[in-house]
Amino acid sequence: MAKRSMIFIVMFCLSALALCYAADDSNVGTWKLNEGKSKIAAGAQKNATVTYTAEGDSYKCVVEGIDGSGNPVHNEWTGKFDGKDYAVTGDPTADTRAIQKVDDRHYKLTNKKDGKATVTGTLALSADGKTRTLKTSWKDANGKSKSSTAVYDKQ
């Protein structure tokens, strides 16, 4: 009986530690696009709000915005910041997203469709945790390279 109790206590502590780690991550919260500081490519999607929540040892990301034609967009991703592909729903240009934590304030991002990278980027969080800057690049339908820099303020 003591062995089972010890296993339960260890599992509980590890779960609690994972939750604390996720809750301390500066990404967690709602981020609003600061259009004045951003440089969004013409015709590119604008993600007006990005919300990260901790879900156990993973994160859920919900994106709301408009596409290049002004139509509303909504996509969701749940995964870890381990660089592995996790399913994304609601994004016609991607079926997986991988986010890799480089250090406490820097991340790499890759969206893929059918296993092929469609968007790559980097994410940087400010030292005070109040601003995040997402730089992305992709090729348009004509094969021309495009890029955007989106600056978000924490709400």
Image (spheres, rainbow, N blue to C red):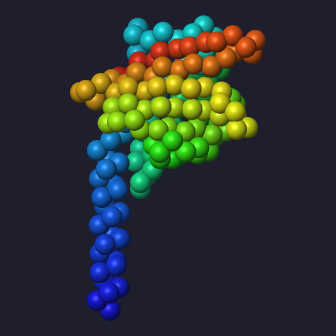
Residue 48's x, y, as percent?
Answer: 49, 22
Query: Which of 133 and 74 lies nearest the eye of the viewer?
Result: 133
Specify the quadrant of the image occupied by residue 139: top right
Q: Is residue 23 visible?
A: yes
Relative to 51, does residue 14 appear above or below in the rendering?
below
Residue 49's x, y, as percent?
Answer: 46, 27
Query: Which of 136 and 33 lies nearest the eye of the viewer?
Result: 136
Q: Quadrant of the N terminus?
A: bottom left
Relative to 43, does residue 23 appear above or below in the rendering?
below
Q: Looking at the image, which residue sits at the far left?
A: 128
Q: Looking at the image, which residue sits at the far front?
A: 102
Q: Quadrant of the C terminus?
A: top left
Q: Which residue is located at x 50 percent, y 38 percent?
A: 99
Compared across the picture, whether 66 is left or right of 52 comes to right
Query: Which of 74 and 38 lies nearest the eye of the viewer?
Result: 38
Residue 142's x, y, as percent?
Answer: 76, 12
Q: Looking at the image, which residue sits at the far right?
A: 142
Q: Which residue is located at x 32 percent, y 69 percent?
A: 12
